[in-house]
Image (cartoon, helix red, strand yellow):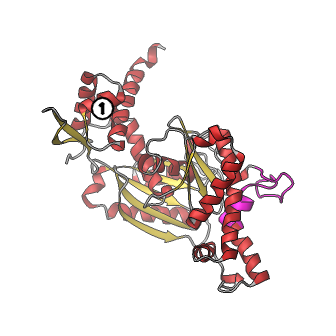
Amino acid sequence: MGMKKAGNVIDLQDQNLMHLLEIMRDHDDVSRQDLAEISGLSPAGVSKLVGLLIAKGIVYEDALVSRGRGRRAITLRINENAMYAVGVRFARHYVKCGLFNVKGELISSCYETLGTVSVQETVDVIQELIARTLEDSGDARERVVGIGISAPGPLLAREGKIALISNLPGWRDISLVHMIHRRFGIPTLIEHDANVSVLAERWFGKGKLSDNLVYIAAGRGVGAGILVNGSIYSGKSNVAGEIGHTTINYNGPVCDCGNKGCLEMYCSSLAFARQAKEIAAAKKPAGWPAASRLTAEAVFELAKAGDGEALELVRRAGRFMGIGVVNVINAYNPDMIILGDEMAQAGEPWLEAIKEVVRERVIEELRKETTIELSELEVEPAFLGAGTLVIKKVFENLSQLPTNALVSG
């Protein structure tokens, strides 16, 4: 391995720097001694690494805190304004763009609906929103370290291309990353929306201390972002986690993907709205809007108000989703599953139906080690995750950041 040696030394240092930053991110008020205890690195090693983080302006020394028996320790904090990321959520019907700090706080954001599905129009809208975000960022502009884009999958993220988006013609082999990078000269990353969502949950959400985490986006499609031992599991072509296309009825109706009886045909928001419209048309339940005006959200509201028909629909969707969750537990054995996106707005009755199926169908030992929760991030995970992608990349390559490039405090 002669040639690789230098690279490996830096890799190890970067790994340790990242590890310390992650500990600071997950625990408030840590001292150098706490870092040594939690990380298992030597106190001298920790001091040296912390010195480097301070020199690079990413960490600063905060107050002196008494630690009992007269010991006083200096606590360390991540400088949340050390760097910024531009996050772009490119969804099927809209684009959202915002400026995020290191703590995942949204500083500013803008939004545009997509009229047509033409590739050129979409790229124009994305570039225009990025330009607007950069213009509005003021002094932070020079500390923008990257642009992260979350896009519907399947997606060939390694080449920065969108491989194809089901139901959107024309999006084959589009190299979005190169277009954006060429225009703004800022490092640009793209990733599948479910994958950035699981990152956002791991960094800033309920998954903070979980290293085997699955985020399920239950929207128009059903996809999962899967974190295995702390790393995104993306498969050979970055298409892993397409759980919406696992079969739950092997003789069921044919799906766009060519398979039969796919999970998402039973529990996506599209399937849910379709089932609700059928009930509205056939039974005309009291207090329901006409079938033509009925949305998934309207049914969730009816269910929350105690409407029996709506509640039954929500529970039914939850039971189907539960079968998907059982498959995820058996396939990936996560310690936590977080559910988000459109269907999660159905709230507790939906979650309860999911858990009911899991109780019936998963062996107890396995079930006991898996927590199932609804997402509670204030910024939706697929948007926040686009910014997280950038910050994570910088955290992983800290030795490349110039010293004192970042303003401290």
- Residue 165, compared with residue 240, is above or below; it is below
Asked if residue 105 can be seen in this view, the reply is: yes
The residue at the point 25 percent across, 30 percent down is 33
Residue type of the residue flagged with mark 1: Leu
- Comparing 23 with 17, the one in front is 23
The residue at the point 30 percent across, 61 percent down is 137
- Where residue 28 sits in the image (x, y, percent)? 29, 44
Q: Farthest residue in the left direction?
A: 70
Local secondary structure at mark 1? helix
- Comparing 300 with 56, the one in front is 300
- Where residue 243 sits in the image (x, y, percent)? 68, 49
Q: Farthest residue in the top direction?
A: 2
Q: Main secondary structure of the magenta part?
A: loop
Q: Is residue 240 covered in magenta?
A: no
Q: Is residue 260 covered in magenta?
A: yes
The magenta stretch is: 247-271
User: Could you classify mark 1 by the number of other residues whose Cα lies within 10 Å: few (under 14), some (14-19), or many (20 or more)?
Assistant: many
- Residue 394, compared with residue 359, is above or below; it is above
Q: Name the residue carrying label 1.
A: 35
Q: Which picture quadrant has residue 220?
A: bottom right
- Where residue 17 sits in the image (x, y, percent)? 34, 32
Q: Which picture quadrant has residue 152?
A: bottom right
